[in-house]
Amino acid sequence: MMCSIYKSTKKPDTYLYVPYQTEFEDLPEGLTQVWGEPELVMHLDLNERQSLALCDIAEVKAKLEEEGYFLQMPPSEEEIAQLIAGKK
């Protein structure tokens, strides 16, 4: 499953995963209003990966199929501490 990952110009450390070649205009209006101008980070084949750094890959795939997007919010302080400790 190919997806495109965008970062928000209004919300630091916030990323939006969408199926590859999705038109940004097709996403929910509320999401696009708070998002700002989308900035492409990369295209990624989720079938070629077993995990992602900050989110569960199975959840990302499910959200892409069910809702057409996955919104990755900034990690909490607890999640950052777990990453540093290597306990993700």
Image (spheres, helix red, strand yellow):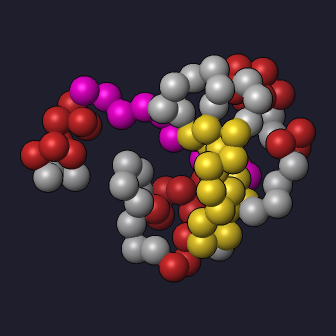
Report whether 75 appears left or right of 68. Answer: left
Main secondary structure of the magenta stretch: loop
Q: Position of residue 32 (x, y in %)?
A: 77, 29
Q: Residue at x 31, y 28 (%)?
A: 76
**Residue 79 located left or right of residue 24:** left
Q: As displayed, is residue 28 above or below residue 47?
A: above
**Residue interval drawn in magenta:** 68-77
Q: Residue at x 21, y 45 (%)?
A: 83
Q: Examine the rendered structure and indicate whether residue 87 appears above or below residue 73.
A: below
Name the outermost residue toward the left.
85
Please state, as top left, top right, bottom left or bottom right, where the N terminus lies in the image: bottom right
Which residue is drawn at the image coordinates 69% and 47% (left, top)? 40
Quarter residue 44 falls in: bottom right
Determine the residue positioned at 60% across, 72% down: 45
Query: Residue 51's spot in the image, x, y percent?
Result: 39, 66
Percent position of residue 7, x then y: 61, 38
